[in-house]
Each structure stands twice: as structure tokens, then as C-alpha cells.
Amino acid sequence: MTRTPTPRPAPDRRGAALFDVDGTLVDTTFLHALAWWQALRQHGHTVPMARIHRAIGMGADRLLDAVLGPGRRPGEDDALAGAHGTLYATWYDTLVPFDGAAELLRATAARGWRIVLASSASAEEVAAVRARLGADDVIDAATTSADVSATKPAPDLVRAALEKVGAAPEEAVLVGDTVWDVEAAGRAGVPCVGLLTGGWTRRELEDAGAVLVHDDPLTLLRHLDTGPLARPPRPPAHHGRAPTEEEA
């Protein structure tokens, strides 16, 4: 008598929902701009805050390139970054998540996605925003500056976030608030949902390649079932057997 093989459980191949942190989940964009403005002034550089704002979302190295230009002194980088970190740390206890941010992470996880915080901030800064966000129960992994050598708009951070959970680009979506997020995701082969919470316009995010743009985390949460985060991608077909109930 021929026995029917018992279907084996599919490997854990849930999609990866990558979330930028600063300016996307927590309202920190302009605090970072202010801290950089103050740090630059401490070292003799007067830079319009609007120019600094347009560079927020890049790593410190690229940000300093953008705001100081080709004549900048690279030997100052560590001192400037250290001053920025010290100034920004004074805000840790008062950081405010955007409305719906934690609920968005939980609702996304409930739909079967693995949640990864994709940040190039220091471990200390990431810990501070995670504490204020209060959603560690659904966060599977997080990146920090220690995970990348080239920061956004390079794709390294997105790739590092994928590696944290063993996901492929086609299994992932990134949610971010800057054109640098959108460009980094695109270079890594990952679609990006843009939010307007970082001060960029809808047109700018769309022109950079965002597949969808919402006002803020709460609006994205309300439309979660009509966008790319509605359901993770299906696992690849397993030849030689019928799909399990979980795969169907």
C-alpha cells in the first residue's frame, strides 16, 4: 500500500518589513538638524539649517560632504559627529513617536512580516528611540552604524537589514521618510513606501522611486491592507509536493 507523504512545514520565509527609524517612526528629523547646526557652529561652521535638513537621513560622512562641500576638513569628522551625538542625546527622554507608529509595527507583524529597524544611527541612539517607541515585542532585528561602512543613499544599510533576518530583496519592503531611503532601497532592489513625516514632498519621494506615499504612520496603518505591506510574499514553490496550508 502506497503511503501519501506527509507535507513538510514550509521554512520560515516570511517577508521582511524594513522601517527607517528617525523621521519615519519617531519625530526626530528636526532635532537632528538642530543638533548638527549647533555642532557645526561649535567648530566654526555657519550652515543654513534648511541645507542641513535636506541631508538628514544620510550617514554623518555623507551629510558633512553635503553641507560643507568639497572644501571640508575630514579631520573634523569625529569631533563634529561626537558633538552632534552629545547635543542630540539631551533630547532622549523627550523623543516622541509619531501617532500610530508602534501600532503600525504590530499590525504589520500580525500580517506575517518580520520587523527590522533599518538605521545607521549609533547603537546608543537606536536604543534611545526603541525605548520611546515601545514596540520591542514585535521587532525581530535592528541595524546600527556598526553594520555598514557606506551609508544612505548607498544600498549597504538595506542589505544589512535583509541579512539580519535572512531575507531576499524580493521578499522585502522598506518604509522611509527621505529620498535617501527611497534611493537606497531602489539600489538594493527593494520597493519603498514613503512617508511625509521627514519634511520631503510627495513629488520628491515619488520622483525618487517610492511605490506609494502616505502622510504618516497612522495613515499608512489605516491603509495597510491596500498596499505592499498587506501580506508578505509567498514562499517559492516546492517541487514534488502540494503546498501546505500555510503556503497556500
Image (spheres, grey):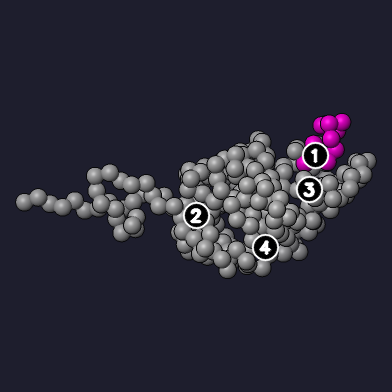
Instruction: Give the secondary structure at mark 1.
Output: helix
- Point out the frontmost of discs 4 and 2: 4
Looking at the picture, which amino acid does disc 3 mark?
A: Arg
Please report the residue visible at 80 percent of the width from the left and 50 percent of the height from the top. Answer: 53
Residue 62 occupies quadrant: top right
State the CA–CA distance, disc 1 to disc 4.
26 Å
Residue 215, disc: 4
Looking at the picture, which amino acid does disc 2 mark?
A: Arg
Q: Which residues are magenta?
A: 63-74
Residue 216 belongs to the span the image colors magenta? no
Q: Position of residue 214 (x, y in %)?
A: 64, 61
Q: Tell me the crowding category of disc 1: few under 14, some 14 to 19, or many 20 or more residues within 10 angstroms, Cα based.
A: some
**Of the residues under marks 1 and 4, which one precedes in the sequence?**
1
Which is more toward the observer, 47 or 138?
47
- To which residue does mark 1 refer? 66
Residue 114, disc: 2
Q: Residue furthest left?
A: 1
Residue 54, disc: 3
Please report the residue visible at 12 percent of the width from the left and 52 percent of the height from the top. Answer: 3
Q: Position of residue 45 (x, y in %)?
A: 91, 41
Q: Is residue 222 left or right of residue 198?
A: left
